[in-house]
């Protein structure tokens, strides 16, 4: 059966078009019940479908055999319940699955895994394509109301359908919903419906399941609890007015180490008589944490108490057992001498929180497979903190770090949905260029008990500070990247973050996002895990310092041992990459040395690369690949990835011809063939030839770009020979990495998602901006190098240097000067001068000037000077000196020479001024 919908819409060009959407309906979609003879056999697929005689926990509400059918909100909020082994034989409608997929990718993945588990007997029913369960949206009906109605229609159909089965005991379908209105409508339509809590509490043999319930409102929104434990905090504006009027007192809250129900507040100011105020009792403490700045209201004198001598420790009882707290408070109110009474008050509001990361241990819940546990801080003045994690078995017994996210009125303990693994004991170090202050990454390497090697890449947790949608986030998204200029950088994030709070500097605690592998000695990955962490880097090294440690015969400390282990593994990893077809290309980079007073460049050198450069690069690449695979597995439609398209064959023409001119063959069929050709392209008499070929190969490449996985099918990174890749390792300077961090945090349950993160169209638009900003940053960097190169040669007069021809043009040659990493063009046509005879050969890439032939990769000598003939458009000029060309004389540069001669006089005048 075919149903269709017709509507009109206006195109961008203004035309009106008619759109027809066809929707196919079928009668042969099976119900999934194993005992049903009315439906065709269920097609092969995940899971085994619904049992003929439903097994599972017995319910006092539904004593007979039954299947469960949840609505969307229940599945979203009670996924922990549905994953429990006790819950079996559940019908998941297509309508529900589609809504869950749009609203929460992690929950969608979890429910798909449950459906695929044959022991659970979950069945996905395609109700939107079944002739008897598909419904049209009514006029004026919202999409949400239409979907709720579709779910109720499916429940009614199932009950009517199962009644036709010949079994003696009929199977009933129970509708589970926490939406009050939806439940009322279901009951009116004769459908058996319960809330999740009602049904779970009816499972008499499984009372532990009640503790796994997520509390929800009537509308299906998750809440903490209905019971109010603490009084409401007064608004800050009213607190400030009250403090000025003398109604409230402001002071520093100091919790007791020995009695968790008692604290003191040291009042700010000169009021000596009220210098210290006692606070006793859970409600009077009112969710203050040690060293918070609080507002206190003094109690009447007949309510004053004396400091308690009783030692009370929080034993982590049930949150609902408030009566036990009241009994403990009564212990404090023993009869005391009136002279011992002290000013007593209650906390009425928080002026400034002192929440920070706290170190401690996880107190695992005794309830089997519970998600909620209590964290016990090492500092007894800090209250226990409730955290939610599915990694309790692994975290138990380890030191972890927790930060408080909130403390609502209806929660006995403060919450935190995230946890951090305490890795401060590891010998972590960073390796960066000299003068680097925005340290994104750090590394560690150690041998573990089973003889394998643990390697960790620790990346600055910038996403902890830059939350989605705040002003910092919006500005960082616009900038997209940090722009690095000579002697200056334009930060993507404020300097307080880039060079301080986020930077993984040595000997300070820093928050990180860690990727940790267990490897064997062949650098084969055995296990990979990701965790939010806190680290304390033991050393901030330059590449040269790290290399010196590795090469030293006398240094054998923990950091040096770690570096040697990393370097050894990195060499193996690099060989594997290259064997798989990864390209090792070359692009000369320069470094300026600046005058400390004038900030003018006084020296120009090409950057020297060491083994440690490659060591760091290998582990950054490995982390990026590992994270890319993880976020794609979790978010196949929303992963932010990076790809490098393969160049079209025509791009390689100049490379192939240049190699052929030196009797070498370069194969470009694949990245692997290209890499192998470049490795073989050596000349014993011309050692720099291979470097020139790799530089030329770089010019043949396409630009790597960011993209959203749901909007593209080609993920391959040509240069790295990797099927998937992303950027994870530089969140201080790249916004793409911040998005990847957020995706990874959601994937491992360390953070919650938000709508824009799972909107592939918005991610695609973001990628366009990131690609544009990245390109503009490259242009700015090149322009900065060009400008400082001009400044460098401004006072040098004429400089004579060796060069190599990179490209041959019809009237010029482009040369590279290795000493300076500088490229320039030597022109053979000048205004006002006779043009020499030129003969250009595109096949062999040569240019004959008069009787002298110049070929690609020929070694020449050039004069470098600043062309100051046009003051407004000064530029570097290069003139060929060797080989000498008949009729072509190397022109002098009078303006450069004059400026060189006048330089002492100019300096003298400058000093006098």
Image (cartoon, grey):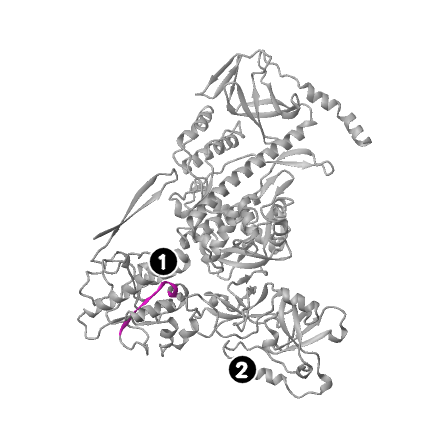
The residue located at (39%, 51%) in the rendering is 636
Badge 2 is on which residue? 324
| Percent position of residue 688, x then y | 54, 30
Quadrant of residue 265 in the image?
bottom right
Secondary structure of the residue carrying tag 2 is helix
Q: CA distance from mark 1 to mark 2?
A: 48 Å
Give the number of the mark in front: 1 or 2.
1
Residue 718, compared with residue 255, is above or below; it is above
The span shown in magenta is: 65-74
Q: Nearer the viewer, residue 460 or 552?
A: 460
Q: How many numbered marks have been drawn onto this rendered protein structure?
A: 2
Badge 1 is on which residue? 142
Q: Residues within 10 Å of mark 2 (few under 14, many from 20)?
A: few
Q: Quadrant of the C terminus?
A: top right
Residue 776, compared with residue 28, is above or below; it is above
Quadrant of residue 86 in the image?
bottom left
Q: Is residue 71 magenta?
A: yes
| Percent position of residue 153, x then y | 28, 64
> As drawn, which residue projects farthest toward the front?
140
Secondary structure of the residue carrying tag 1 is loop
Left of 132 or right of it: where is 906? right
> As drawn, which residue projects farthest toward the right?
912
Residue 94 showing in the rendered view: yes
Q: Is residue 285 magenta?
A: no
| Percent position of residue 239, x then y | 65, 67
């Amino acid at each position: 059966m075919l149903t269709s919908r017709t509507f009109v819409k206006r195109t961008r060009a203004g035309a009106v078009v008619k759109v027809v959407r066809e929707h196919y309906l079928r009668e042969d979609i099976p119900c999934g019940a194993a005992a049903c003879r009315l439906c065709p056999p269920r097609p092969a697929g995940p899971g085994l479908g619904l049992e003929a005689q439903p097994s599972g926990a017995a319910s006092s509400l539904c004593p007979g055999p039954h299947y469960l059918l949840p609505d969307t909100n229940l599945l979203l909020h009670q996924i922990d319940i549905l994953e429990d082994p006790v819950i079996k034989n559940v019908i998941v409608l297509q309508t529900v699955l589609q809504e869950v997929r749009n609203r929460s990718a992690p929950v969608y993945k979890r429910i798909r895994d449950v459906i695929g588990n044959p022991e659970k007997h979950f069945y996905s029913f395609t109700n939107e394509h079944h002739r008897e369960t598909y419904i049209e949206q009514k006029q004026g009906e919202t999409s949400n109301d239409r979907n709720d109605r579709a779910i109720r229609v499916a429940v009614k159909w199932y009950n009517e359908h199962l009644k036709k089965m010949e079994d003696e005991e009929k199977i009933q379908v129970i509708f589970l919903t926490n939406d009050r209105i939806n439940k009322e409508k279901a009951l009116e339509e004769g459908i058996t419906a319960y809330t999740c809590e009602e049904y779970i509490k009816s499972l008499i043999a499984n009372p532990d399941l009640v503790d796994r319930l997520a509390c929800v409102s009537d509308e299906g929104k998750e809440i903490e609890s209905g019971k109010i434990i603490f009084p409401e905090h007064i608004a800050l504006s009213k607190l400030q007015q009250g403090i000025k009027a003398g109604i409230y007192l402001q002071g520093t809250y100091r919790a007791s180490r020995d009695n968790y129900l008692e604290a003191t507040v040291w009042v700010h100011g000169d009021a000596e008589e009220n210098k210290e105020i006692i606070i006793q009792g859970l409600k009077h403490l009112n969710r203050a944490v040690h060293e918070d700045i609080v507002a206190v209201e003094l109690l009447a004198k007949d309510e004053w108490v004396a400091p308690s001598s009783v030692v009370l420790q929080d034993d982590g009882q049930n949150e609902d057992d408030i009566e036990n707290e009241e009994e403990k408070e009564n212990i404090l109110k023993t009869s005391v001498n009136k002279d011992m009474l002290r000013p007593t008050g209650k906390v009425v509001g928080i002026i400034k929180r002192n929440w920070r990361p706290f170190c401690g241990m996880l107190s695992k819940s005794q309830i089997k497979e519970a998600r909620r546990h209590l964290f016990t801080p090492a500092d007894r003045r800090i209250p226990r903190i409730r955290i939610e994690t599915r990694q309790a078995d692994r975290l138990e017994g380890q030191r972890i770090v927790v930060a408080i996210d909130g403390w609502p009125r209806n929660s006995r303990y403060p919450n935190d949905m995230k946890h951090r693994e305490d890795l401060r004991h590891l010998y972590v170090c960073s390796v960066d260029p000299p003068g680097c202050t925005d340290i994104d990454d750090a590394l560690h390497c150690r041998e573990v008990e089973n003889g394998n090697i643990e390697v960790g890449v620790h990346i600055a947790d910038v996403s902890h500070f830059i939350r989605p949608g705040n002003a910092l986030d919006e500005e960082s998204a616009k900038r997209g990247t940090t722009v690095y200029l000579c002697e200056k950088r334009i930060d993507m994030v404020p300097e307080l973050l880039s060079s301080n709070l986020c930077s993984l500097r040595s000997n300070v605690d820093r928050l990180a996002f860690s990727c940790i592998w267990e490897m064997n000695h062949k650098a084969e990955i055995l296990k990979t895990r990701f965790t939010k962490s806190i680290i304390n880097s033991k050393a901030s090294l330059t590449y040269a310092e790290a290399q010196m440690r590795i090469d030293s015969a006398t240094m054998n400390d923990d950091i040096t041992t770690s570096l040697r282990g990393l370097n050894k593994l990195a060499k193996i990893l690099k060989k594997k990459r290259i064997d798989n077809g990864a390209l090792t290309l070359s692009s000369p980079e320069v470094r300026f040395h600046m005058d400390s007073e004038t900030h003018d460049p006084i020296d120009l050198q090409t950057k020297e690369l060491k083994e440690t450069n490659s060591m760091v690069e290998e582990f950054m690449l490995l982390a990026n690949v590992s994270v890319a695979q993880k976020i794609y597995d979790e978010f196949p439609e929303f992963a932010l990835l990076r790809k490098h398209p393969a160049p079209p064959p025509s791009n390689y023409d100049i490379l192939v011809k240049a190699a052929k001119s030196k009797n070498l063959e370069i194969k470009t069929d694949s990245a692997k063939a290209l890499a192998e050709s470049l490795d073989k392209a050596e000349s014993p008499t011309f050692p720099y030839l291979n470097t020139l070929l790799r530089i030329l190969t770089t010019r043949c490449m396409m630009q790597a770009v960011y993209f959203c996985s749901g909007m593209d099918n080609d993920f391959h990174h040509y240069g790295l020979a990797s099927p998937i890749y992303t950027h994870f390792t530089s969140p201080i300077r790249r916004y793409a990495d911040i998005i990847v961090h957020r995706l990874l945090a959601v994937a491992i349950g360390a953070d919650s998602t938000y709508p824009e993160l799972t909107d592939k169209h918005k991610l695609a638009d973001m990628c366009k901006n990131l690609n544009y900003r990245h390109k503009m940053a490259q242009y700015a960097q090149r322009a900065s190098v060009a400008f400082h190169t001009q400044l460098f040669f401004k006072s040098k007069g004429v400089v004579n240097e060796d060069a190599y021809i990179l490209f041959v043009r019809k009237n010029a040659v482009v040369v590279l000067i290795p000493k300076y990493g500088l490229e320039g063009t030597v022109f053979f046509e000048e205004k006002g001068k006779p043009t020499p005879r030129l003969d250009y050969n595109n096949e062999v890439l040569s240019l004959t000037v008069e009787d002298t032939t110049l070929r690609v990769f020929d070694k020449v000598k050039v004069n470098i000077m600043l062309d100051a003939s046009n003051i407004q458009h000064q530029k570097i000029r290069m003139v060929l000196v060797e080989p000498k060309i008949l009729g072509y004389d190397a022109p002098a540069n009078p303006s450069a020479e004059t400026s060189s001669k006048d330089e002492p006089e100019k300096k003298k005048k400058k000093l006098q001024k």
